[in-house]
Structures are given as structure tokens and as C-alpha cells.
Amino acid sequence: MPDDGARLLTGPRVEPLLRAAVEHQGGQLLTWSLDHVDAAPEQSTTATYVAQVAWPHGERTELLGVSARTGDLSPSDARADIFEDGHRKVAVWLYPNDPDLLGLPRAAFPDRMAETLNAGTVLTRPVTAEQLSLSMIAYRPRRRAVVKVVVNDPREVFYVKVLREKVFADIHHKHQLLRQAGLPAPEVALTTADHLLVTRELPGMAMARALFEPGDPCSPEELINLLDAMPASVAALERRPPWSDAVGHYARMVSATLPELGDELGWLSNQISTGLARFPLGNEPTHGDFHEGQLRVAGGRVVGMLDVDTIGPGRRADDLACLIGHLSTIQRMNQQQEAKVRDLLARWVPVFDRRVDPVELRLRAAAVVISLATGPYRGQEIDWREQTIGMVRSAGALVRQVTPNG
């Protein structure tokens, strides 16, 4: 089996590389811990580490990133520092100098963000770094980042997507396409040459939060109608494979971290792939990653749809299954919250069943759950084993609902 670097980057043997990288920058590594792991089994592994570093000007907490590959390093790896452990070359960088996210240094610091907003005349007045509050909402090393920018006096909120060069123009076009069709996608306020997409905050409350407020966040019919309102031109965009196409890949990723789940995941993956083989690809306009974290609601209605990077042709069951999969795997809920989500699913799924094939819906939802089961380990959650096992069991419950003798 090709060595994808996972063992090196998740074990103690990575320390000399981290130490050498910090010393190369003029610092001294004091302590470190694994923060996040992104693995493509048998291809590559990228990991980040929280490190305490002593610099000539004082101690700081830093984020270090390392990428290893089975074959040659990628062209963008050359933007990082290249080190060898005696057997292979790896790319190492210090946040925010991510080799694939060239705009991250601009988005990570208030002074540079203020300069960017002022140069783009995004606001009606110039702002200073002191008027900005920045927080990292999401960071997938070498893939994407999202930074929330709050401007004070008066308060305005922006979200800055830090993108790779090869996807930037496509994602910008998708935002414009939906806005022109009247869909509640984010308004693009500014773009930059280093691939930042600055959008204005949408109205309403995040559905992920509204789930736990009194009443329903919206109706299931509202969700279906929103998806069905997407323009036909979305179906002419490049096709993104549905989550179910990669169920075997995600099952192997989970099995690599929890081998005792290998047989169960193999059976689930086979049932899902076999069961979905009779369904064509589909040419409906789809969101591609439709879940409670992507929606804004107010007054029982959907008023915003986020993260439209993934729109394209597919099957409506893909989108509805994605929502079911996410709702089925929300972590850290108390008993009252769990009861609320179970009740919503019990009432919403039958409505979805009238719009799409019920068997297809459950198999696709199970595939989404298996893809999500890679998350606790990637994020190095303290109880990642228990969370992962729980997710695999949820996927199994969905498959067994529609599998004879399951």
C-alpha cells in the first residue's frame, strides 16, 4: 500500500520536522499537538499542529501545516518550505502562509483587511484596523477558509471566502447566477486578485441555531420550493459527483482510523452502491451541500442560502438526503434538543418522501452520514471514536430501513 504520510504526520516522528521548520523561521519549538488531519488514503495527508513557539520577540501560539504525498510534491508545495525526514519530502508552512490559499494572509489580519475594504470602497466610509473584528469560521488547510469580518460603528458584517485560484472564477459566477435569478444567495461585495470573495451577511438567523428555538425553523415544503426555484441554467454547470459516489472512499477513511468498523462499513458501502445503481445521474438544479448550516431563516421562512459553491446538475434526493444526513448527526445536543430534531425528522421526511423516491432518499442520506463520520477524527475531537461509531450506526439504521433482511 502506498505510504500517504498519515502515519508520519499523526505520530511522534513528525516532531523533528516541526522543530526544523520553526528553527528555519528563527524560532524554537516548545510544545506541539495535532490539530486537524485531512487524508486522501494512499494519495496524500495534510495535518495542522498547534505549537507554542519562542521567537526572538517573545512566545506565541502558532499553527503549523504539513503536507505529505505518495508521489512527487505538487507545484504549489514549492510555496512552502520543503524538508526531508530521511525517506520523503514534505511541505511545511506557518499559518497564514498556506501554499494554496494566497489570500489568507490578507484575510487573517485586521490592518490588511481594512486596507482591502477601503480600496474596494465596500463601505460608505474608510475604516481602520481597530474598527474590525476578525474570526475564522472555517479553515480546511490548502482547500478553503472563511473569515467573518465585523465592522463596528455602525455594525456591518462580511464573510470572506479564501479560495484556491482554480475554483475562484467558477464560484464567483455561481453567486452571480443565483442572485440574478432572485435566489437568496449572498451578495458579492468585493473580489481580489489573490482570490478573496467578500460577501455581505444575509438576513435572519442560522437554521442550525433556529432548530433549537421555539417552533419550526421553516416548513419542509419551503425547503423543497427553495431548491426547485433554482434556475434551469444551474443544471448546465459542471457536474459535481453526489456524496454517494464516494461512499467507498469515505468508508475506507473511517476504517483506517477504526478498523473494527471495517466489516460494517464494507457492508453499508456495498448496500448503498448496489441500491443506488438503478437511479440515473439526474439533471435537476441542485445545491450540492444542502444542510442546516447553509440556511438562514426568519419568521418560519428561508431568507438566505449559503455556500453555493457546489451548485450544479443532480437529483433532488441528493439535496434532501444531505439535509437528513446532517440533522441525523448533530453532536453535543441535550435531551430536549435531541427530541426536537427527532420530531422534525419524523415530520419532514414523509414530506420529502412524496417528492423523491423513499429508498433513494435513505440510501443517499446514509452515504452523507458516512462522509460526515470522517469529521471527528479530522478535527481531532476528544471523543472522536464514540462520535464516529455513533455516526456509522446512524448510517446503518437508514440503510436497514430499506434493505430486506438488513
Image (cartoon, grey):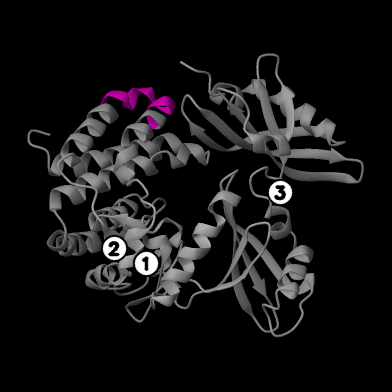
Give the Cα separation between the discs numbered 3 and 1. Answer: 35 Å
Q: Give yes or no for contact between labels 2 and 1 (Cβ–Cβ under 8 Å).
A: yes
Residue nearer the viewer, 95 or 98: 98
Q: Nearer the viewer, mark 3 or mark 1?
A: 3
What secondary structure prevails in the magenta region?
helix
Q: Give yes or no for contact between labels 3 and 1 (Cβ–Cβ under 8 Å).
A: no
Residue at the disc numbered 1: 212
Residue 328 image position (x, y, % from top left): 30, 51
Name the residue at 39% across, 44% down. 372
Q: Quadrant of the C terminus?
A: top left
Stretch in magenta: 254-263
Residue 191 image position (x, y, % from top left): 63, 66
Residue at the disc numbered 3: 96
Mark found first going from the N terminus, 3 or 1? 3
**The quadrant where residue 207 appears:** bottom left
Question: Which amino acid lies under the numbered mark 2 shown in the image of this protein?
Answer: Lys
